[in-house]
Image (cartoon, rainbow, N blue to C red):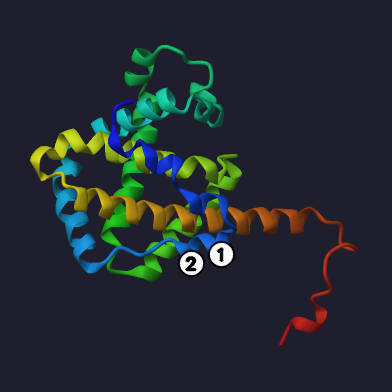
Amino acid sequence: MGCAISGLAAKSEFAEKTSEDAAAAAAYPTEDQIQMIKDSWKVIRDDIAKVGIIMFVRLFETHPECKDVFFLFRDVEDLERLRTSRELRAHGLRVMSFIEKSVARLDQLDRLEALALELGKSHYHYNAPPKYYSYVGAEFICAVQPILKERWTTELEEAWKTMFQFVTSLMNQGYQEESARQRQLALSPKERPDKRNTAL
């Protein structure tokens, strides 16, 4: 819808690879990119509720199939009703809180990885498959460009894209791990691999 970054979702090749390939393929932001992200976040965080709503309204406009994942919004066609929805505002704030935590943990790779993996695992239980994760990053970037105004540069865009690709690759990995765990739990005891010999 006019945003130059809309290609992020379409070009997220890593979303179609296996989870381990994806995590390996997604680059971690450089120190300069981390600083750019943190500096821009200081401006963005003043408008997090607004960004969260814009991000999801745009997501539902550009990818209407995403609404199927959201029980509350599945049948809502009126975008104005979405913009004023308390539930959408609350979900947007939760996503923005995750982004804020991710930004804060960019200097703590182990904590960032744990956060993103856990979110991917929880998304398995929400029936929110990985193919949608990169869309959120693309719409976030579109939503913050007008807020950052002249501060927005191609370098900053690349920094945010790198962070989102890294985080969504970890979420994908977490989703796949939880999916495998649930499949294992669904097996009858006779079908499960024998683990008696693996314990120390």
- Viewer-side residue, 28 vs 42: 28
Q: Report which quarter residue 28 is drawn in.
A: bottom left
| Residue ID at (69%, 57%) | 180
Identify the residue at the far left of this view. Answer: 150
**Label 2 close to label 1 by CB (< 8 Å):** yes
Pick the quarter of the image with the N terminus: top left
The residue depicted at 49 percent of the width and 51 percent of the height is 13
Reply above or below: 83 against 18. above
Please tell me which residue is depicted at 56% across the width and 50% down the height of the picture: 16
Residue drawn at 36 percent across, 32 percent down: 90
Circle on res. 88: none
- Of the numbered discs in the image, which one, if any, rests on residue 24? 2
Q: How crowded is mark 2: few (under 14 residues within 10 Å), some or many (20 or more)?
A: some
Q: x%, y% of residue 165? A: 40, 53
Kindly identify the amino acid type of the residue bearing the numbered disc 2. Answer: Ala
Tell me if residue 4 comes above or below residue 83 in the rendering: below
The picture quadrant where one finds residue 61 is top left
Q: How far apart are marks 2 and 1 (CA)?
A: 6 Å
* Quadrant the C terminus occupies: bottom right
Where residue 20 is drawn, which disc sits there?
A: 1
Q: Is mark 2 on a helix, strand or loop?
A: helix
Q: In this view, does 66 lie to the left or right of 180?
A: left
Image height check: is 133 above or below 60?
Answer: below
> Secondary structure under badge 1?
helix
Q: Which amino acid does label 1 sit on?
A: Glu
Within 10 Å of the Cα at label 1, are there few (<14), some (14-19), or many (20+) other Cα atoms? some
Residue 145 visible in the shown view:
yes
- Residue reaching furthest to the right: 190
**Residue 103 quadrant:** bottom left
Q: Position of residue 11 (x, y in %)?
A: 44, 45
Position of residue 106 measured from the top left corner of the image (x, y, whole percent): 29, 63
